[in-house]
Amino acid sequence: MSLENTSDMDQNEEQDILDSVMGGDVDAVAKPEFDVLRRVAGDASKNKEFRSVPIPPHRLTPLKKEWLKIYTPLVEHLHLQVRMNIKRKTVEIRTCKETIDTGALQKGADFVRAFSLGFDIADAMALIRLDDLFMETFETKDVRTLHGDNLSRAIGRIVGKDGRTRHAIENASRTRIVVADCKIHILGGFANIRIARDAVCSLILGASPGKVYTKLRTIASRQKERF
């Protein structure tokens, strides 16, 4: 069969399809029909969501001690269902028909996770009340690989005597910092976390606390001028 005959057949088939459509043969090109998806706000069986937040072993005792303070805002403010699973060492959170806010589950999970990382309940509560707060975690080895005494000295520079360096960074950057062995957790706004992270990284790299204090004073004075 020649190429000319093949092209003629293709043109004939296209013409037949066009004739059937123009002639009203809709079945040949009918659109598929799907059932309409409906989501009922009060239907708890369809809208129920679940989160499980793992708790480190060293935070189980504080969790049991402060359980009432953790349980109350999750149930009364976010309208979530919460339970402590001792066997799995987790806090399980789920929505219910009383849950109104679509982001309540995420806020509740962030609140419990902040407490599990070592933040105070008062500081972690800000994650429920405010929308522009975040948490960032990094390790000292992400900045510089240190071992033995060098690692201990780096952590000592971050914390400072009686926690003075850490408090100075928190006050200047308006954040909260938790130093847990080699991990550093920072809670605050996006721009504020960056300021605190830069200061901590400078201390890990070997900068003296005096230089970091000077830089923090400059940043604090700039922030006061803005406001």
Image (cartoon, rainbow, N blue to C red):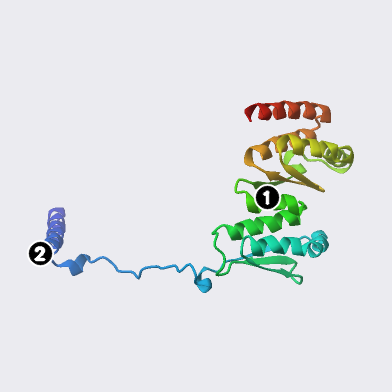
Can the viewer see residue 54?
A: no
Q: Residues within 10 Å of mark 1 (few under 14, many from 20)?
A: some
Question: What residue is at 76 percent from the left and 44 percent from the top?
Answer: 177
Which quadrant is home to the C terminus? Answer: top right
Q: Which mark is residue 126?
A: 1
Element type where label 2 sits in the image? loop
Q: Amino acid at mark 1?
A: Ala
Q: CA distance from mark 2 to mark 1?
A: 66 Å
Q: Which residue is depicted at the point 73% across and 49% down?
A: 123
Find residue 221 and report its image quarter: top right
Q: Position of residue 109 (x, y in %)?
A: 65, 59
Q: Residues within 10 Å of mark 2 (few under 14, many from 20)?
A: few
Foreground pick, 6 / 59: 59
Q: Which residue is mark 2?
A: 23
Q: Is residue 42 left or right of residue 3?
A: right
Where residue 9 appears, as percent x and y from the top left, is 14, 59
Question: Which secondary structure lies at badge 1?
Answer: helix
